[in-house]
Amino acid sequence: MAGTAEGNGSSRREFLRAGALTVAGAAVVACAPAAAPAEEATGSQAPAVTQASVATNDFEAAYEEVGRQWEGTLLRVPVGGVGHWAVNETASARFTELTGIETEWENNPYDQVYDKTFLDLGSQSGTYDIIDLNFAWFGQFIATDGLMRLEDYVDNPAFPPIDLDAFVPAVLEVYGKWEGGLYGLPWLGDAMIFPYNQTHFEAAGLDPDASPETWDEVHSFGLELTQDDQYGFALMGGRQIQAMCTYAAIFFGLANKGFYDDAGVPQFDSDEGLEAMEIMAVKLPEISPPAAISWDIVQAAEAVAQGTCSMEIQWPGILQGLIVEDSPVYGQMGFSAPPGGTPLGGHGIAVSNYSRNKDAAYLLCHYLVSPEIQRQYVSEGYAITLTDLFEDPEVQAINPYLKTMGDAMAIGLSWPRTEETNEVFDIMVKHINAAITGEEAPDEATKLMNDEILELRRERGYVS
Amino acid sequence: MGTKNLKRIRNVAMIFVVAAVWIFYFFPIYWMVSSSFKTRADTFAIPPKWLFWPTLQFYLNSFTDPKFLKVIQNSVIITGTTVILSLLLGAWAAYAFARFRFKGSLTLSFSLIIARMMPPIVFIVPLYLLFNSLKLRNSHMGLILVFTVFNLPFTVWMLKSFFEEVPIELEEAAWIDGASRLQAMGRVILPLIAPGLAATAVFAALLAWNEFLFALLLGGPDTTTLPVFLSGFLGERDVEWGDIMATATVAVLPPTLLVMLVQQNLIKGLTLGAVKG
Amino acid sequence: MTSGEQRASFEQGQVSEGMQGQIRAAGGERRNRLLGLPLHFILIAPTFLIVFGLLVYPLGYAIVLGFSNKILTGSVPFKWVGLENYIDLLEVDSEMWTSVGVTLRFALVGVFFEFIIGLSLALLLNREFRGRTWLRVGLLVPLMVPPLASGLIWRIIYDDEFGVFPHLIRTVGANPPIFLGDPDWALYAVVATEVWRSSPFMVLVLLAALQAQPVETIEAAEVDGASGWQVFRLITLPFITPVIIVALLFRTVDALRTFDLIFLLTAGGPGTTTEVISMFIYRWGFRHFKLGFTSAASILLMIATLIICIFYLRMLVVRQAEVQLTQE
């Protein structure tokens, strides 16, 4: 029944009818409480006309005109509260003023956003209208048939236009597309970058403008930088996902290829995979504080912010502490793309296939990734995804790592997005941490990791 | 002379013991509260900072958040109802197990604990599906039900052992005066086991107050409890450390008040017990 | 206990023959019935309805799925696999056995210290001293702190760079280990946190039991010249034993499935040295979504817990039998 929303209405009127059908269809499913909005939608010729306009420019007017027909709809989003989400929550307040479409952002701990979304999509209950599409979850969500195809919406003239080519190409591919289909719009760009303390570099006799270009250089620079209570590197070595991210960064940097070959076989027992583990488990701990074998992202980022460690490979989302004025390392930091390559992080924004308000939900996605909103909120921490914005001097002036982030995103490699990716990560984290803490020898850990992943992928039919 | 010295040594030893106990239990609490007044740079200072300029930023954050009051209200309603239900139902069942011998009594009371033996994770998926179809997800009632179910085994067992300690003669005396069993239980026994009731209530309350997994996954925006709200400060990359510590400090206050109230009861229960003993 | 329930319900252990006659005279037959049903039945019915009403489905779900290969993500075809999950789990070199070892160490060491500390503090708090009320209230605070906050706080206290604890150890000249990163230390660091959080439970429960103790018996024994230790061993301890057993029972059941603290402090690391069974189940259930496998693991955990509980229960029954013997 919900399928009607995908009706490829080419004219505005047809589209509206499709929309009304969806709402009416949903009303049958949802019984009495949903009946009221259904009537409202069918009876609405154009409520926007009767309402005094609040839009102040063409951009806003476009959303106001389309959105008013869904006035009173409530859109639920499973993220909110902190970081990127807070910025988007703020941005959507204006969307509500324009269209009368309400939004509800749920402050879930990020680790469990996946669990909650997954349960919702898996049980087809349609609690959430908008899906935060962390691309590592792509395969899982596709497997539940939980994501709506967006092509018909993108091409639909009833909606404000959207230029997909304006997004960073890698990001559109990774955050939005699955086997040729479009399921998400590039929402929050993310790639690991390499912050380093230029003041420390200078003090150790290193060139403050020459960040390490290979991981061997990271190690040799690190040895120069490590003395007394000072350490060269802040390793995220605890048993948590960042250990995998760091390993992936090193592996990408050395091998410049993905986790699997064309036949789907994991490549960690290659020379580069072994070397990456050696760097991760032996070389980086040598130049990191002893405590780093239990560290998560916060401890590592703070150790650099306190000036105890000089280098790290890190996600931009936590680097605010390096550039605020009361930071102990204010003005000391340089930023570069990591040696050789880097992993992409980041999120698309998608519409749930089980949502009862798909049209309104799409409009909100569309609004949040628009160039106007990205530009307006980038200074508050919006993680931009548009090529032009990264090039814009005004934007680059906002903080010193935005440009680096754009560079990193352009060369970023993505980790796999297939359905079993979370399991692969889990296996990797376990063995990487075991190697760092000496529970397993690096080559032993790499081999076990590779074998377990291979077995899992065989089991799931990705390797014959 | 000798005994006097001995006494002094014992007093000093006692002070040391009590001080050690205080430090062990309170240092982490102190660190939490002081962290809630620290800026981020101070929280993660190396070496750790004992003296710092306090900031009220994080308290202002939480108290100006319109969601926060609603969250406290949710927590109070859910916890309060859970405690009342658990004690009411639990006391009945406990009384039955303590005072009646019937076939399968032991097996039945034991089977209750099974509810507490499974790792909660396994219950999540089926309960989610069940609550979905019963429309209990994202409702106060749903969480109250779950918490009551996880509380009842403990409530029943705890109260059962307290009921068993009360001599039956006291009850019999009331029966002879014409009271029914339930009346005798209410008037004679419950006041006698007040300390036990208070202790049980405190634990039932704490379980409901701090439960996280079910509150998160079976609840929703309408039922956000304090632990769930708190966990919302864990972002994808960052942890809003100060906000978490400030909110946690605020979260500790209501149960502390409750315990202080119950503390009076504990002492009253004790004296009552002594009088009747 | 011979005939039907109604008759059986009269035979309360401690009621003397003569007393029973009197109760009957005062309308005992009617007293034990309500709405035409045995009173005890009516009293326990709501509890069982609500507990099993809610749990029968999840429990059945877990039992049934334990025999399948169910993976929540959906693209692997569903299949009944008989005992395969159980066989995989119980294989000698399976990961589960590592977790079982860790869990047992965690629970045994943890509950042991909780009990020792709990009983000592309960005895201490049962005496008069200045500040006793404050300490009694204050001890509960660790229980009140939301686990997320206590997990984070302990994590930072233990941290070798940012933490107070290693810092203090260094100021007295010793060299601290990396508490949460050293495979030899991590489990005990986690246990210490668990003891910090859960021993107040023991304290309060045992304290309540101590306070329910009739003062006269102790006074009488003291008049007879019994020493403090004798009073404790011969009068107090037997009196509070049932409560001790129940408290141990619940603490053990909870310790065997502790999850939140470990998740926050080490997430099972370093390596798998703190991967308790519920961490193991979490990983397979919520990271891998292998519900069939996880259900089987949970059923095994339940059976193991059940066996341990039966052991406690037998202690309780034996103790009750002793009491009856002494009373007769």
Image (spheres, grey):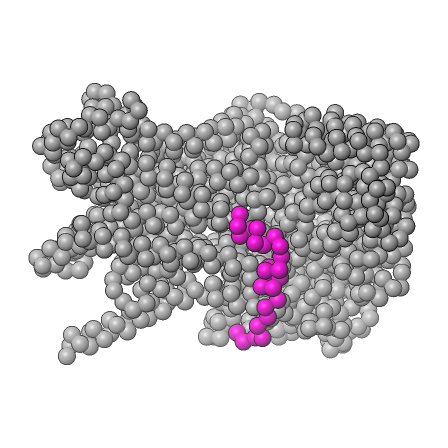
**Outermost residue, top direction?**
C3
**Measuring 31% from the left and 64% from the top, which residue is drawn there?**
C132
Can residue B156 be seen in the rendering of this structure? yes
Residue A311, position as x, y percentages in the image: 71, 66
Q: Is residue B71 magenta?
A: yes
Left or right, A107 with respect to B212, comes to right
Answer with the quarter of the image where residue B97 lies: top left
Specify whether residue A77 is painted magenta.
Answer: no
Q: Main secondary structure of the magenta part?
A: helix
Q: Can the viewer see residue C74 in this picture?
A: no
Along the viewing direction, whichever of B133 and C155 lies nearer the viewer? B133
Over which residues does the magenta segment extend? B50-74
- What residue is at 72 percent from the left and 60 percent from the top? A313
The one nearer the camera, A363 or C281, is A363
Task: Say above or below: A103 vs C82.
Answer: below
Instruction: From the viewer's side, name the closer residue of C285 and A460.
Output: C285
The quarter of the picture where the N terminus of chain B appears is bottom left
| Residue C111 pos. (x, y %) | 37, 50
Q: Residue furthest bottom?
A: B1
Expressed as whole percent of the image width and height from the top left, the position of residue A335 reads: 78, 65
Q: In the figure, is residue C184 to the left or right of C317?
A: right
- Give how far across and how far down residue A30 sits, in percent: 66, 29
Closer to us: B21 or B233? B233
How many numbered badges does the structure rendering display?
0
The correct choice, above or below, for B102 with respect to C124 in the image is: above
Q: What residue appears at the point 20 percent right and 73 percent down from the top-left corner?
A: B7
Q: What residue lies at 89% left-to-right and 60% top-to-bottom? A: A392
